[in-house]
Structures are given as C-alpha cells and as structure tokens.
Image (spheres, rainbow, N blue to C red):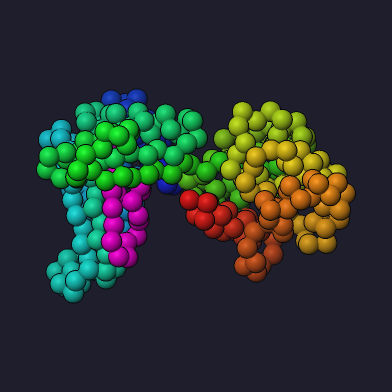
Amino acid sequence: MTAGGGLLAVLETARALRDQDQPFALALVTDTEGSTYRKAGALALVAGNGERTGTLSGGCLEPALEALAARVIASGAPEAAVFDTRDDDDLLFGSGSGCRGRMRVLAWPVPGPGQALFDRLEEAHAARQSLAMHVGVDAANLGRVTFDATQAEAGMLAVLVAPVPRLLLLGAGPEAPPLLHLVRAMGWLAEVADHRPALLQAGRLDGARALHAHRPAQALAGLAAPPDAVVVMTHLAGADLEALQALVALDVPYVGLLGPPARRDELMAQLPAADRERLQPRLHAPAGLPLGGHGPEAIALAITADLQRFFHRAR
C-alpha cells in the first residue's frame, strides 16, 4: 500500500484504511529476549484482507502474525502471542529461523480497542515526539494501554515508540533523488530546499514531503521546528557557507556537509571561532560513512548509512 517503511508506512496505511472504513489490526512488539529481528516498540499492521505493512521478522513469523491479526479483527478483542525460537525444536518443528530469541506481540483491532492507541500514535507523530506507554500483557490487563505511568499496574510493560526521523536537504543536486529514494525506504521524512528552480522540477524529487524554492538561510528560518538532521549539499561554496552560518544557532543534532575535507576546512575557517565551536560537535563532514564508490548513488548510500547509525545511537 505504501512504498515507505517503518512507523511512517504503518501510519500512512492505517490512515488510508480508516478513510476507507476498512478494519485492521495494529501489532506491537512489547518485549524481547535474545536475538530477535525487531525490538520492543516495533509496529506492524495487518488489514482485514490479510495485507501486511511492516515486518517483525525476516519472514519466518509473519504467517503467525497474520493469523493473530485475523483472530483479533474477527473477535474484536486484543490478543497476545509469544514467538519463541530459542530451542532446537524450533529449527525442526517451528519457524526454522534459528534466531534464538523470544518476542511477545500484542495486537489490537481498529476500529475497536486499538483506536485509542492509533489516535495517540498520530498525535505523537504530528508533535514529532516519542510515545511512551504501558501495555497490559497478562490476563487481568490484556490489551489495556495507559499513557500515564502513574496508572500502570502489575502485568503492564513499559514500551517506547520512537518518532519518525525528519530531514532537510539543503541542495537538490544529483545526490538528492537517490538519497530521497533511500530515505523513503527507511521510513523517514525529508524536505528539500534549493534556490535553483530547474532542480525543483516536477517528478525529479518525488520522495520529498515538501520542496522549498529558497536559499539555505531562508529555508532554515522558515522551519516550524528544527529537523533531526540537515544535509548541506548545494555544491556551491557560498550557499554552503550560508547554511553553516544559519545552522550555528539552530538546535539541529546532525549537520552533514557534502564535499572533501579540504573544502570543509575552508568553509569552517570562514566562521568565527565561537561559531565553529558551537557547530563542530554536530558536524558530520564529509557527510556519509566511508563505504567506497563514486557518484550520486554511492554518496546517497553513504549518507543514509551514516544517518541510520546516528538515529540509532540517538535513541
């Protein structure tokens, strides 16, 4: 239903099904032990027709997840399932994954008991915030959800759903289209700003949530809230310097700068010493992990890998 991934794909699919008055089940990983494909806080969705968005394993557990969702939608009540692949019997008679882990999944029907969770997920997404909750996994509290820690009872587990990362690309050069494709696949949100109209032509930057025909300083000044990451990639020294100057005062935890180290040093040398000190701890330059390769696609992959590492560490 969507070309994206992660929480973003789940939310987009849920909205579409809601607008079509189609039932679905929300499935949440509440806790894990050992080696598991996903960890607590991961979400998936299964529509009433069996179509799934999101994954909880490499495919070995998905048939059981889809069966769980079908039961939940049919009964109108939440249900929990435990997938345990830690013993040798699972290799022969179970999923055959060999992952040696245990995962508990709680599923709710929507509409129904899962509606409140879906609403709070939407609110947290709009506010760009994590969603902290306690969920009941024992018989007495099965499926109960509270977003107030003071109301948590025995048999309820604390679960945190991390927000969707948000990026701003300052520059729509040749790396932007492949980078947006990867960003979308990762389930992140990205906007692009560039003052050159030819680079913002229709269809070239389909993966962007918004396009801004602005220079870097104007684009940054117009943000409703600072993004989680900004990648400075205009290929123009003056525009990149303008971007760095504007980013000094903004609370953006990741600032990526495209280009070789010598170019980085030249640009940073033009900033006052105090500004360099404020920017340096957040600066990733050259942007991207040193994976090897050349050209827009290789650069886009390297930047995506570095962003993934940063977002994972930030959590």
Which residue is pictured at 85% across the width and 46% down the height? 272
Report if residue 41 lies within the magenta region.
yes
Q: Quadrant of the N terminus?
A: top left
Q: Is residue 120 magenta?
A: no
Residue 141 lies left or right of residue 23; in this view the side is: left
**213 lies above or below 297:** above
* Among the 4 quarters of the image, the one containing residue 153: top left
Front-lying residue, 289 or 16:
289
The residue under the point 29% across, 40% down is 134
Residue 13 percent coordinates (x, y)? 37, 36
Q: Position of residue 104 (x, y in %)?
A: 23, 53
Relative horizontal placement of residue 212, taking residue 146 as reference (left or right): right
Residue closer to the observer: 142 or 170 = 142
Residue 154 vertical placement versus 21 (above, below): below
6 up-or-down from 13: above or below: below
Give the residues in magenta: 24-43
The residue lying at 57 percent from left, 35 percent from top is 209
Task: Estimate the x, y position of residue 213 in percent, counting from the top left.
Answer: 72, 31
Q: Position of residue 86 (x, y in %)?
A: 22, 68
Does 142 sit left or right of 179 as displayed?
left
